[in-house]
Image (cartoon, rainbow, N blue to C red):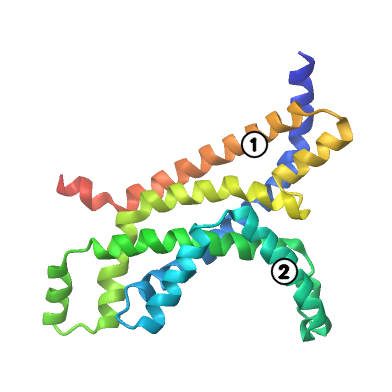
Amino acid sequence: METITNVISFLPALIKATPLTLLLTATAGIFGLIIGTLAALARLSKYRLLAWPAFAFTFAFRGTPLLVQIYLVYYGLGQILPGTWVRHSFLWPYLRDGLWYAIAALSLNQASYNAEVIRGAIQAIPRGQIEAALSIGMTRWTILRRVTLPQAFRHCLPVLTSDLIILLKTTSLASTITILEVMGTARMLQRQSLLIFEPLIAAGIIYFAVVFILTRIMNVVEFRMTRYRAVRA
């Protein structure tokens, strides 16, 4: 009974930290989708000057742990930037905060996975649709904007949703660079209360609730974007 009471007592502090976790997830998710889409298009390019750097980017970020990437971005840039012009610019009040380094690392990591998912979805589009669009006078840019990308996003939306949920949970690694999101707050509560399990249980409840709500929202989005499949069936 005491354990349950302690868990409940930790929930308000963790709920206050939840918006920061959501900010990390939303920001890294948006940037990850944009960068991932560009990387996917670069990988599909016939120009090696675009394809090879995109391949190296996805291979490097998918092949190394996210925690290592966070440390490299935070401690690496944290040592380089103070000795440059950035230290005396308007950017420094923002760049000295660990939040921006966490967003950068999470965004790049998410982009590397999104790039492969989107690339596969683009390649799955029947070649006949592209040829039909070309036959009626569409430009390559118009085909990409009105045919290729809309269909690709519909096809890979379930996978992108799963990756977004994984991103939400991996934001807990941001606590390793002094960011007090849900997991960072849970660790702070551990030190203050000298309790180990109760803050972690409370954090798990918060993550479970947020994942449940996010899953329901994405299910609605997926249904609205793929209604034509149900009508066709």
Residue topped by disc 1: 206
Confirm whether residue 223 shows in the render.
yes
Residue 139: percent from left, percent from top: 23, 84
What residue is drawn where x is 37% and y is 58%? 117
Q: Please name whichever residue, 158 or 69, is drawn nearer the observer in this view of the structure.
A: 69
Q: Is 46 placed left or right of 134 in the picture?
A: right
Residue topped by disc 2: 76
Three-letter amino acid code at the position of disc 2: Gly
Q: Earlier in the sequence, mark 2 or mark 1?
A: 2
Residue 93: percent from left, percent from top: 81, 73
Three-letter amino acid code at the position of disc 1: Ile
Q: Please name whichever residue, 120 or 146, is drawn nearer the observer in this view of the structure.
A: 120
What residue is drawn where x is 59% and y is 55%? 66
Location of the C terminus (image quadrant): top left
Q: Please name whichever residue, 68 or 166, is drawn nearer the observer in this view of the structure.
A: 68
Q: Is residue 106 above or below residue 158?
A: below
Which quadrant of the figure has residue 104? bottom right
Give SS at disc 1: helix
Location of the N terminus (image quadrant): top right
